[in-house]
Image (spheres, rainbow, N blue to C red):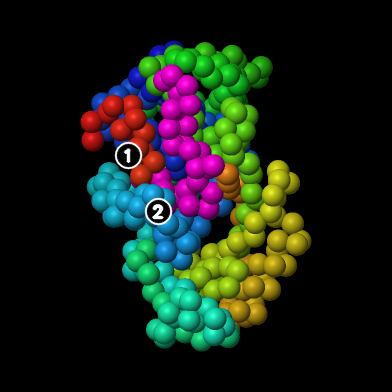
Amino acid sequence: MKADVIVVGAGIIGALAAYELRKRGLEVLLLDAGKEGAATSASAGMLAPYPEGLSGEVLEAALFGLERYPDLLAELGGLGLPLEADFAGTQVVALSPREEEAWEAREPLAYPVRGGRGARTFPGGYVHPRRLRQALLRALEAMGTPLLHAEVEEVREGEVRGRRRGASPEEPLAARARYLLLAVGAWGGRFGLGVRPLKGEALLLEGTPPPVPLFAGDGYLLPREGGVYVGATGREGWAPGVDLFGLRWLADYAHERFPLLEGARFREALWGYRPVGELLVGEVQEGVYAAVGHGRNGVLLAPWTAARILELMGVKP
């Protein structure tokens, strides 16, 4: 099995990189192990460079992503793949005099927040990550890009080896390409990359959504599927699922901080592993590239990451 580029990992980072490569005529093979807890499945899809405290080159990368998203969504919409997204801004609510001064939070609140003293709105917005991934995969399928469910076990110059999943017994996999891209999220440590898992948990509630993504204290809210996404916890390690500690923190945060969510009906609990550690988008050995370590800003940084990978591979924009 051969291709110009093999992309390992079909989350937002891998799928968007594969989409941009395929648009430019390269033959792409996309491999994904379907790992439980992949970050995209639980991501908020927040596009908030300034409230996230980004700076320097990472802030520039985030602003690139924020600027790119409207055109990207228009492209996918032109393929009949509409997406839930909005770019009306993000708001930070000050809960103390110190926060009010630090954030210069002197605007009225866009959404009732108990203890809120004022707010400040920044450029930003959100996009629905799971639907974005589905749209990218459908676009790739329409362009003839194969997606194989496979566990990659070995990567070396020009070749990957592993096992195809879904068959019994599992079939061996061997594929060759000019370039390889590892977009493997929190599982980067298996390939010697400096990332580790930080589990995040979130809730989807029935209730009145905020008009824009809203940061208040240790958590945040944003609109999601006609309801409210409430996030998020952050705990080290590979413990799977949402547990009572996480549920209690999220429920208390929503109930105590936001009057419109008192008694809100529960819809769904989400969880996934953020890949934290060193942000690495570059060549790790000849012909092998990595895109890992995006932490809680993977969706925001995905367009810049894809553009950077194209540049490193010498693909014309």
Instruction: Decide whether residue 244 is among the magenta residues.
Output: no
Tell me residue 160's x, y (percent).
Answer: 51, 17
Badge 2 marks a residue whose secondary structure is helix
Badge 2 amino acid: Gly
Quadrant of res 268: bottom right
Quadrant of res 121: bottom left
Looking at this rendering, what residue extends furthest in the right direction?
Answer: 244
Whether pointer 1 and pointer 2 mark residues with C-beta atoms closer than 8 Å, the reply is: no
Tell me residue 204's x, y (percent).
Answer: 57, 63
On screen, 17 above or below 302? Answer: above
Location of the N terminus (image quadrant)? top left
Badge 1 amino acid: Ala
User: At 41% from the left edge and 20% from the top edge, which residue is drawn?
Assistant: 287
Q: Which residue is mark 2?
A: 56
User: At 58% from the left edge and 63% from the top edge, which residue is drawn?
Assistant: 231
Q: Which residue is mark 1?
A: 307
User: At 64% from the left edge and 44% from the top edge, which residue is drawn?
Assistant: 197
The boundaries of the magenta stretch are 278-303
Q: Which mark is residue 316?
A: none
On screen, 78 above or below 109? Answer: above
Is residue 155 visible from the viewing direction of this image?
yes
User: At 48% from the left edge and 26% from the top edge, which residue is drawn?
Assistant: 284
**First reached walking from the N terminus: tag 1 or tag 2:** 2
- Calculate the distance from the C-alpha at mark 1 to the C-alpha at mark 2: 18 Å
Crowding near the residue tagged with mark 2, few <14, some 14–19, many ≥20 C-alpha atoms within 10 Å:
few
On screen, 241 above or below 102? Answer: above
Instruction: Decide whether residue 291 is among the magenta residues.
Output: yes
Q: Nearer the viewer, residue 273 or 146?
A: 273
Badge 1 marks a residue whose secondary structure is helix
| 201 on left or right of 303 | right
On screen, 224 above or below 21? Answer: below
